[in-house]
Image: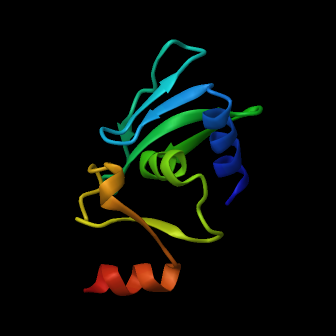
Amino acid sequence: MNNCDKYILRCIQENKISVDTKNGEVYSHYKKSNYKIMTNYAGYEYLDFQFFDRRWSVLVHRVIYLAEYKNIPDNFHIHHIDKNPKNNNIKNLIALSPEDHRIIEKS
């Protein structure tokens, strides 16, 4: 896991944020509201997350996966099984090595 993933996981474990793994909502207990979900140029949903003194754009599907499984293996990608980047339901997400992800995306 990268440092940003570790920080997000810590925020989940310390109940600073809550994650609905079925509909993809991420709630900030500090702000007392859901994070604003935006869409990037490739169609993937992301949110802006404060990480120490920096603001990071974090892909929502990574946050959902972390909330459910508590780990993303180093250098692994989180793949949308149905190839719909807006479907962040946990049942639609799987961790894949970069090589396996490339093979699946080409098929």
Q: Identify the residue at image location x=54%, y=43%.
A: 57
Q: Residue at x 48, y 53 (%)?
A: 65
Vertical order, 68 against 42 (above or below): above
Direction from residue 55 to residue 65 in the image, left or right: left
Q: How many marks?
A: 0
Spot occupied by residue 103 in the image (x, y as percentages of width and height): 37, 87
Q: Nearer the viewer, residue 59 or 27?
A: 27
Q: Is residue 30 left or right of residue 27?
A: right
Q: Nearer the viewer, residue 3 or 56?
A: 3
Judging from the image, the colouring scheme is rainbow
The residue at the point 70 percent across, 42 percent down is 7
Indicate the position of residue 30 as horizontal and vertical percent values: 60, 15
Identify which residue, 49 or 30, lies in the foreground.
Answer: 30
Which residue corresponds to the image point at 25% horizontal and 65% vertical from the top-left?
83
Query: Looking at the picture, how far across and down is residue 28, in whole percent?
Result: 53, 22
Q: Residue furthest top?
A: 32
Q: Quadrant of residue 51?
A: top right
Quarter of the C terminus within the rendering = bottom left
- Give coordinates of residue 64: x percent, y percent: 45, 46
Q: Quadrant of the N terminus?
A: bottom right
- Look at the picture and state if 93 lies above or below 55: below
